[in-house]
Image (spheres, rainbow, N blue to C red):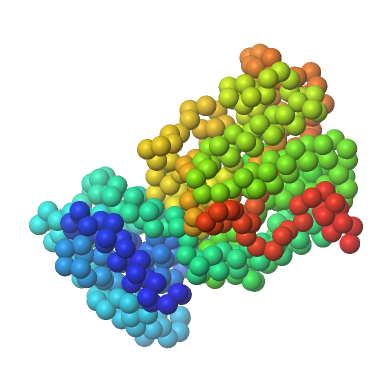
Amino acid sequence: MFDKKVYVFRRRQLRERMKEEKGLVVFPGNDESPMNYPDNPYRFRQDSNFLYFFGLDHAGFVGVIDLDDGEDWIFGNDIDVDDIIWMGEQPTVKEQAAAVGVTHTADLGKLQEVLSTAVQKRRTLHFLPFYRGDTLLKMSEMTGLLPGEVKERVSESLIRGVVSLRSYKGPEEIEEIEKAMEIAYEMHTTVMKMACPGIVERELAGTIEGIAAARGNGIAFPVILTINGQTLHNHYHGNVLKEGRLLVTDAGAESLMHYASDITRTIPVSGKFDQRQKDIYEIVLKANTETISAVRPGITNKNLHLMASRIIANGLKEVGLMRGDMDQAVSLGAVALFFPHGLGHMMGLDVHDMEGLGEDYVGYNAEVHRSKQFGMAYLRLARKLEPGFVFTIEPGIYFIPALINKWKKEKKFTEFINYDKLEAYMDFGGIRIEDDVYVKEDEGVVLGRPIPKTVAEIEELMAR
Ligand code: GLY
Ligand code: MN
């Protein structure tokens, strides 16, 4: 946990952002979530917004900010002797709340009274969007409102207030992200050392998940580790690594305080890239390094995405897979056949930071609107970069047979795409290279210890 001053300051800032509003701001922390029966839960993950404002990594708490009288509350139940037998002694709710600068505490029965009375008195309740059904049902029960009526209390001013704070990472948060990066370094270099023909994806995925659990708070998102890197979020780990294939590993860890890292590396199973793989790899690497070099406050991430798209299109033209005017191919969306996702996303307490609040609130604003074009439409962060942002840069080139065949059949963009030559790439897979970048006053800085990224660096480590 950070010093309690951090949480007091954050809550004060949120009040400041919401000074035009009245009522109660309610942050339901998460409960344990059962896997197959109530006492057999998934790894507990506290809600990121609760963590940001109330810091307590404990199930079953609810934080409340009263905008009218200026008081903060934590509601939760103290444990009794039966719980102590199974879980051991725990600090009281009051003691835990004091550690984050909250003096008012009460049990969940009292919260029910507070919330239902607020509804009867027509006080405004501000909630963030719900992503767990059990949380919505709990709030329904406590307010006496139907779940649909609770959802009507999802508050745009609260969403905007939270985004306006969480988007800018303080030095204490960067320190946490650096810890998550160090774990990612170990995860990715371990894959590079272990990968070889004959090993099953699961052995690698399980090993790095173990590293994340041993060094921090586990993985920040389900490990993507696959010889079928053309599938963007491939969580199947049952393939045997084969000579001649590429292996995409997109994996990151949480620090003990739940800050994420998110790194992708692509390596040749054999330990050496063949010429065809090297040609495509160098294009993706150039898209990664040149966009990173261009990071500075004031540039939009939409422009960085377009820059990466142009590098990819021009590179593919040199290889003979694209043809014609590449600026046009980018603006019309033809390059999305090979690069069908966005360049990156915000990162922090969530790997896709604040995505649960609505991607458009986080990545877009009045200046930059979401495109409807295939590919560009998936760009999660498009707005101008500002000092304090942490975000990913993750260009890729993919050969997705189903998509290629569909476009070919539709004769889509035949002026830009050499479908005949593409036939030989149906078994290529995909390449993605991802780093996490911190926007400083005049430049972008790649966080973490450098993880081998050039052809020479990867081949050198794999040879060891
Ligand atoms: N690391 C997975 C993603 O960014 O979508
Ligand atoms: Mn990512």
Closer to the camera in the image, 189 or 61: 189
* One can see residue 391 in this view: yes
Closer to the camera in the image, 381 or 243: 381
| Residue at x 48% of width, y 51% of height | 386
| Residue at x 43% of width, y 47% of height | 362
Instruction: Give the answer, above or below, for where 431 lies relative to 161.
Output: above
| Residue at x 69% of width, y 63% of height | 449
Residue 288 location, x and y as percent?
A: 68, 45
Instruction: Give the answer, above or below, for where 228 lies relative to 462.
Output: above
Q: Quadrant of the C terminus?
A: bottom right
* One can see residue 43 in this view: no
Question: How many numbered discs sit on the rendered protein?
Answer: 0
Instruction: Give the answer, above or below, for where 183 lies relative to 384.
Output: below
14 horizontally vs 341: left or right: left
| Residue at x 34% of width, y 83% of height | 95
Residue 258 location, x and y as percent?
A: 51, 65
Report which quarter residue 199 is drawn in: bottom right
